[in-house]
Image: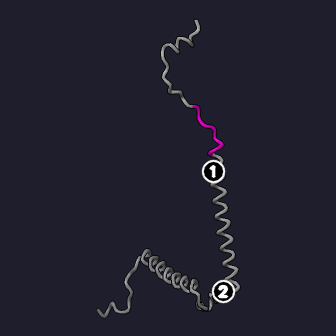
Amino acid sequence: MSESEGQLQDYSVDQLGGFVVMVAGAIGSLLLVVWQSKCHCKVNCCYLFQCERRPPSEEEMKGLKEQAMALKDKKDKDKKDKADKDRKAIEDKKPAPTISTEITTDEENDENIIP
């Protein structure tokens, strides 16, 4: 047992890849939570990547709210316009000719025959 102390087991490349993906996912999830939070935060990753996030001010929040309402109104208008356009296209289509299913008698047929 003393001979194998301090040595790592042999790992395959796919196990190393899985480890890298799991670590990257964990770090990404942590950063996502931090950036979506409404608090002031600074991130410094080994002096290679630095980021500072501040929550929006009251004026910025009003502007964002107005932008959201404008986008919503535009989206609703576009939906309504598309529905109107579809409805008009359906109404503009000419109905297909129909086959008459009336029952005629022999007397009526005799009248239509030219001698």
| Secondary structure of residue under mark 2 | loop
Cα distance in 3D space between marks 1 and 2: 41 Å
Mark 2: few, some, or many residues within 10 Å (few <14, many ≥20)? Answer: few
Q: Which mark is residue 111?
A: none
Residue at left offset 38%, top offset 92%: 6
* In the rendered image, the vertical position of residue 54 relative to residue 94, given as above or below: below
Give the residue number, with chain letter if any, for mark 2. 56
Which badge, 1 or 2, is on the more N-terminal residue?
2
In the image, residue 45 lies in the stretch drawn in magenta: no
Quadrant housing residue 39 = bottom right
Quarter of the picture containing the N terminus is: bottom left
Start-end of magenta stretch: 90-97
| Secondary structure of residue under mark 1 | helix
- Give x and y (percent) for residue 31: 55, 84
- Give x and y (percent) for residue 114: 59, 8
Q: Is residue 76 visible?
A: yes
Mark 1: few, some, or many residues within 10 Å (few <14, many ≥20)? Answer: few
29 sits left or right of 79 in the view: left
Quarter of the picture containing the C terminus is: top right
Q: Residue furthest left?
A: 1
Amino acid type of the residue that numbered disc 1 sits on in the rendered structure: Asp
Give the residue number, with chain letter if any, for mark 1. 86
Judged by its main secondary structure, the magenta piece is: loop
Q: Residue furthest top?
A: 115
Q: State yes or no: discs 1 and 2 in contact (Cβ < 8 Å).
A: no
In the image, residue 95 lies in the stretch drawn in magenta: yes
Amino acid type of the residue that numbered disc 2 sits on in the rendered structure: Pro
Q: Residue furthest bottom?
A: 2
* In the rendered image, the vertical position of residue 100 relative to residue 110, given as above or below: below
- Give x and y (percent) for residue 12: 41, 76
